[in-house]
Image: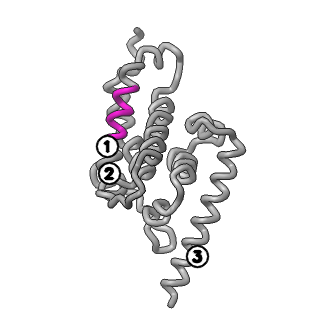
């Protein structure tokens, strides 16, 4: 092991804020997001040597695990409405992030939360994590074409919802 090789502890410290915020955007429940991130870190820790030896990017690997856990959770969830506890504002406060996520006076949280889980995952990975279509396809285990169609549908829904919110505020 070389002296400049990243340790698991260093990886967790460096990635925790980004991955937690990504998780919150995916599930809109801070406590669930923390649980999913903890599970993600456990899985990464078990495979750490293999990940580093294989030349993989540990954050990309962790993000893929996190997205899959969020999607699996959504599939398993019973058909009753869940009340989210904590949101991205809480994570901003905890991680010291200063970005304000408002679009046309409407909190982005509300707009994103209305999207289906896979569309939300694609939007979060594309615009929050700044991944390419190919990286998103790999993270979600879908084709680039499916990434494009999810992105298109999500952006159409977001524009429509923002336009409706804007019209409601003008009245």
In the depicted structure, whether residue 12 falls above or below residue 5: below
Which image quadrant: the N terminus? top left
In the depicted structure, whether residue 99 falls above or below residue 161: above
Q: Quadrant of residue 62?
A: top left
Circle 2 SS class: helix
Q: Which mark is residue 163?
A: 3
- Which secondary structure type mostly characterizes the magenta part of the structure? helix
Q: Position of residue 116 (x, y in %)?
A: 53, 56
Q: Position of residue 69 (x, y in %)?
A: 44, 38
Circle 1 SS class: helix
Residue identifier under label 2: 30
Magenta-colored stretch includes residue 41:
yes
Q: Position of residue 129 (x, y in %)?
A: 51, 45
First to last magenta residue range: 34-43
Q: Which mark is residue 34?
A: 1
Asked whether 83 or 162 is in front, the reply is 83
Magenta-colored stretch includes residue 8:
no
Q: Classify 10 Å Cα crowding around label 2: few (below 14), some (14-19), many (20 and above).
A: many
| In the displayed structure image, the side of residue 95 where residue 104 appears, left or right | right
| In the displayed structure image, the side of residue 129 where residue 9 appears, left or right | left
Q: Classify 10 Å Cα crowding around label 3: few (below 14), some (14-19), many (20 and above).
A: few
Question: Residue extending furthest front?
Answer: 79
Q: Are marks 1 and 2 in contact (CB under 8 Å)?
A: yes
Question: Residue extending furthest right?
Answer: 145
Circle 3 SS class: helix
Q: Position of residue 170 (x, y in %)?
A: 51, 87
Q: Earlier in the sequence, mark 3 or mark 1?
A: 1
């Amino acid at each position: 092991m070389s002296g400049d090789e990243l340790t698991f502890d260093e990886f967790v410290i460096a990635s925790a804020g980004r991955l937690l915020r990504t998780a919150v955007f995916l599930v809109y429940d801070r406590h669930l997001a923390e649980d999913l991130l903890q599970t993600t870190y456990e899985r990464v820790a078990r495979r750490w040597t293999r990940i580093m030896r294989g030349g993989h990017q540990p954050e990309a690997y962790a993000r893929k695990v996190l997205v899959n856990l969020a999607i699996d959770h959504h599939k398993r969830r019973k058909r009753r409405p869940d009340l989210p506890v904590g949101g991205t504002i809480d994570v901003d406060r905890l991680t010291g992030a200063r970005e304000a996520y408002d679009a046309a006076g409407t909190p982005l949280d509300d707009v994103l939360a209305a999207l289906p889980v896979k569309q939300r995952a694609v939007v979060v990975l594309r615009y929050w994590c700044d991944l390419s279509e190919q990286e998103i396809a790999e993270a979600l285990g879908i084709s680039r074409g499916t990434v494009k169609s999810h992105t298109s549908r999500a952006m159409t829904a977001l524009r429509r919802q923002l336009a409706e919110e804007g019209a409601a505020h003008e009245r």
